[in-house]
């Protein structure tokens, strides 16, 4: 069979039974998605009091790792990545689904030029709420988090996915996250207070399109 990736995270305030139920619903709902640009869950389970989730492996580099080695992406490449991501996001909206975790670490780029987003809905299932009291992930996992998710603690929505996609494309074009900060808490505050500069200030070759 195909290789798969697994995610192990501390449960925190989640009750294991409730989390497993949410993941099983996510697995069922994700089976309706039909897009080469999405990698929905393929299995979930519980083993030795740990809950796990698996999705089909996509060979390639994460966008974050690619930028570490190569710097920012050419604008024409970002435009193609955006087109492919939007195909996946349109499929999500068609299925009344939200991704909830669009970021450079969750975008895989294959050697055949395909852009694939990590499992839709997974972060929202594991972490239904975000905010200042939940700054327990590495800073980069807050690079594209919509401000209303921090301020109001709301779950992921289509609107928050659009914001996250914009942040990600800004990141790919400039080679740096749109909101500065060396800690998770600083990132959360930044999405509330920071002013994101015009992308052309840092990537002047970006077309108006």
Image: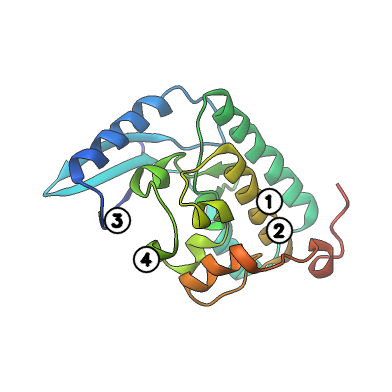
Viewer-proximal residue, 98 or 131?
Answer: 131
Identify the element where label 3 is drawn.
loop
Identify the element where label 4 is drawn.
loop
Classify 10 Å Cα crowding around label 4: few (below 14), some (14-19), many (20 and above): few
Q: Going from the N terminus, do you reach mark 4 or mark 2 first?
A: 4
Image marks 2 and 1: residues in contact by CB distance under 8 Å: yes
Position of residue 66 measured from the top left corner of the image (x, y, whole percent): 59, 62
Image marks 1 and 3: residues in contact by CB distance under 8 Å: no
Q: Which residue is mark 1?
A: 166
Q: Which residue is mark 4?
A: 136
Q: Which residue is mark 2?
A: 170
Q: Which residue is at 61% across, 73% downward?
A: 180
Viewer-proximal residue, 77 or 93?
Answer: 93
Viewer-proximal residue, 155 or 205?
Answer: 155
Question: Which residue appears farthest toward the front when viewing the image?
Answer: 152
Position of residue 113 measured from the top left corner of the image (x, y, whole percent): 64, 44
Which of the 4 image quadrants contains residue 145? bottom right
Identify the element where label 1 is drawn.
helix
Q: Going from the N terminus, do you reach mark 4 or mark 1 first?
A: 4
Position of residue 13 measured from the top left corner of the image (x, y, whole percent): 25, 54
Classify 10 Å Cα crowding around label 3: few (below 14), some (14-19), many (20 and above): few
Q: Which residue is mark 3?
A: 9
Image marks 3 and 4: residues in contact by CB distance under 8 Å: no
Q: Which residue is at 63% across, 67% downward?
A: 193
Which mark identifies residue 79? Answer: none
Question: Which residue appears farthest toward the left when viewing the image?
Answer: 48
Position of residue 41 measured from the top left corner of the image (x, y, whole percent): 38, 36
């Amino acid at each position: 069979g195909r290789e798969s990736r697994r995610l192990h995270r501390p449960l925190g305030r989640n009750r294991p039974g409730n989390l497993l139920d949410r993941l099983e619903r996510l697995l069922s709902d994700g089976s309706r998605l039909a897009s080469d640009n999405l990698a929905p869950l393929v299995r979930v389970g519980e083993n030795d009091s740990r809950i796990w989730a698996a999705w089909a492996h996509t060979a390639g580099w994460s966008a974050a790792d690619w930028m570490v080695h190569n710097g920012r992406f050419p604008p024409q490449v970002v435009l193609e990545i955006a087109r492919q991501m939007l195909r996946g996001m349109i499929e999500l909206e068609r299925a009344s689904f939200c991704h909830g975790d669009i970021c450079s670490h969750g975008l895989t780029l294959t050697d055949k030029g395909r852009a694939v987003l990590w499992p839709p809905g997974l972060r929202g299932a594991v972490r239904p709420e975000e905010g200042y009291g939940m700054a327990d992930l590495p800073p980069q996992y807050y690079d594209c988090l919509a401000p209303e998710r921090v301020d109001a603690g709301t779950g992921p929505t289509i609107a928050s996915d659009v914001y996250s996609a914009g942040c990600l494309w800004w990141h790919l074009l400039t080679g740096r996250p749109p909101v500065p900060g060396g800690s998770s808490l600083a990132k959360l505050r930044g999405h509330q207070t920071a002013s994101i500069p015009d992308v052309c200030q840092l990537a002047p070759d970006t077309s108006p399109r």
